[in-house]
Image (cartoon, rainbow, N blue to C red):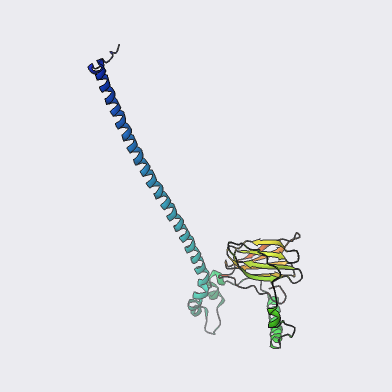
Amino acid sequence: MQAVKPRPLQAASIPGMLGLFQNEWDAVVLSNYALEQQLQTARQELSHALYQHDAACRVIARLKKERDEARELLLKADRQAPAAGTDPVATPAAVISNGKRAPEADTESEGPGKKPRQGITSDIIKELTECNARLSGQRKKLQISPALATPDTLEKYTQLASHPLHSSSKPGILSIDIHQTKDLVLSGGVDGTAVVFNRSSGELVSQLSGHSKRVTSVKFVAKDEYALTGSIDMTVKIWQGQEDGSYACKHTLKDHSAEVCLLPLCQFDVF
């Protein structure tokens, strides 16, 4: 049987008990003070760690952004490099003694962006040549039509309506086209979208979203109910009209190595 530790002599009297209580209270207060100091130190360390984590996240985000920008610049440089650096190196090896270019050397020296594209047949070349000759003759005989509006008439024009079709956070319209047979207007904006608008009803028919940057040129192809959009993201999209009036993207052309600024159509609305 374990013996019970006897009580000290101070506990035998009231003054002694008060002294014991005082000592125990001092010990509790000192322990509480030490705990508060440890808590304050832990809070400071946690705050410092959180600040370090936030700074690290910001640095990582900035490095990722710089990496993406560097990749984009490298991709643009790779696409533009064949056009700028192919001729000086490839010309001596590609030209033979009779002055003609060797097909094998020309094919090897050209970069991926300079390879000949399939699809331009001899019939297409003949059609384009005939169209060029006909239009060149017409341009030589071109005269200003007397039916054109005079400057005085244009000064009398007033605004009939205003329709905010594009994003207000990125305002601006860079290109516009009017349908040849329907009362439709196609506009391309800084917000990277194109909008088909019905002038008679005042309603938005379709919103063409797909470009990653601003749309610089739009064009209607009334022959087959197509719409074309070009952007500085170096792509051209071909949209086809649906039965419900909307437009769906059918093709995306990624052959350009620079910004697409204009989408001119030939006289036949084919090229």
Q: How many marks?
A: 0
Q: Residue at x 50, y 69 (%)?
A: 77
Q: Position of residue 119 (x, y in %)?
A: 66, 71
Q: Is residue 28 left or right of residue 128?
A: left
Q: Residue at x 66, y 70 (%)?
A: 176
Q: Is residue 56 left or right of residue 32?
A: right
**Quarter containing the N terminus:** top left
Residue situated in front as seen by the camera: 58 or 35: 35
Q: Position of residue 228 (x, y in %)?
A: 67, 68
Residue closest to the far front: 15
**Quarter containing the C terminus:** bottom right
Q: Is residue 85 left or right of residue 136?
A: left
Q: Position of residue 24 (x, y in %)?
A: 29, 25
Q: Quadrant of residue 215?
A: bottom right
Q: Is residue 4 left or right of residue 220?
A: left
Residue situated in front as seen by the camera: 50 or 201: 201
Residue closest to the far top: 1
Q: Residue at x 44, y 52 (%)?
A: 57
